[in-house]
Image (cartoon, rainbow, N blue to C red):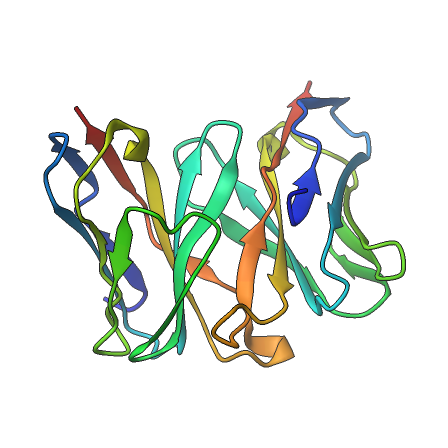
Amino acid sequence: DAGITQSPRYKITETGRQVTLMCHQTWSHSYMFWYRQDLGHGLRLIYYSAAADITDKGEVPDGYVVSRSKTENFPLTLESATRSQTSVYFCASSEGPGQGGTEAFFGQGTRLTVV
Amino acid sequence: QKEVEQNSGPLSVPEGAIASLNCTYSDRGSQSFFWYRQYSGKSPELIMSIYSNGDKEDGRFTAQLNKASQYVSLLIRDSQPSDSATYLCAVKSAAGSGGYNKLIFGAGTRLAVHP
């Protein structure tokens, strides 16, 4: 299916465990983003990537790791999950940095609960 | 100071009225501005983009940009109950530490349109 998909949709994990959230897009967009959404904070940027093998920190990167070995995939790893990382995580993608191509399209979200 | 600021609301308007949503941003170098709508439990979806000072109209929606005042707004004419959602302002910010642009969101304004 064309578009951007996230997996899993729902995840419960224990404190201290490593967990990876997957994001896959079929548009060959160069930019990909990871956000978390918590009540009262809107969408906060965790990490983003301008192309394969190019990543940069966003507003709240601590405790997260990303990689982008292929254009279409952008996994987000919580190295040692904490309760404060309980959130809804959204992945998004957009075309290059040009003015007309910067609209971002979102995946369905992953609801992560850390117990 | 947050990079993108919005009044969290809720903004309550009667059906048929004009809803006015506002957003300010801190980075004077920002060039691209977006409004997203997010229904409860769903992903954000793009409704408007604007790149130049002035107004841009699309159906019942009008986006307004004033770069000198670092201000973006969204007007919704003839508001309908189906417009009840959270509206997120997003700004393509200047290059981050790695030299690439990032997309930053405000916390969102909740709009309630009552019959």
Q: Quadrant of the N terminus of chain B?
A: top right
Residue A33 in sight in this render = no
Q: Nearer the viewer, residue A46 or A103?
A: A46
- Residue positioned 54% across, 60% down in the render: B103
Task: Place residue B51 in its image quadrant.
Answer: bottom right
Judging depth in this view, the residue of A2 and A52 nearest the camera is A52
Q: Position of residue A74 (x, y in %)?
A: 26, 65
Question: Is residue A34 shown above or below A88?
Answer: below
State the residue at coordinates (10%, 39%).
Answer: A17
Residue B76 horizontal/vertical position (percent): 75, 42
Q: How many marks?
A: 0
Where is residue A69 drawn, in percent x and y? Answer: 21, 77
A41 sits left or right of A57 in the view: right
Residue A79 pos. (x, y %): 17, 48
Residue B110 shows in the view? yes
Q: Residue at x 47, y 27 (%)?
A: A39
Where the C terminus of chain B falls, by quadrant? Answer: top right
Residue most extreme to the top: B115
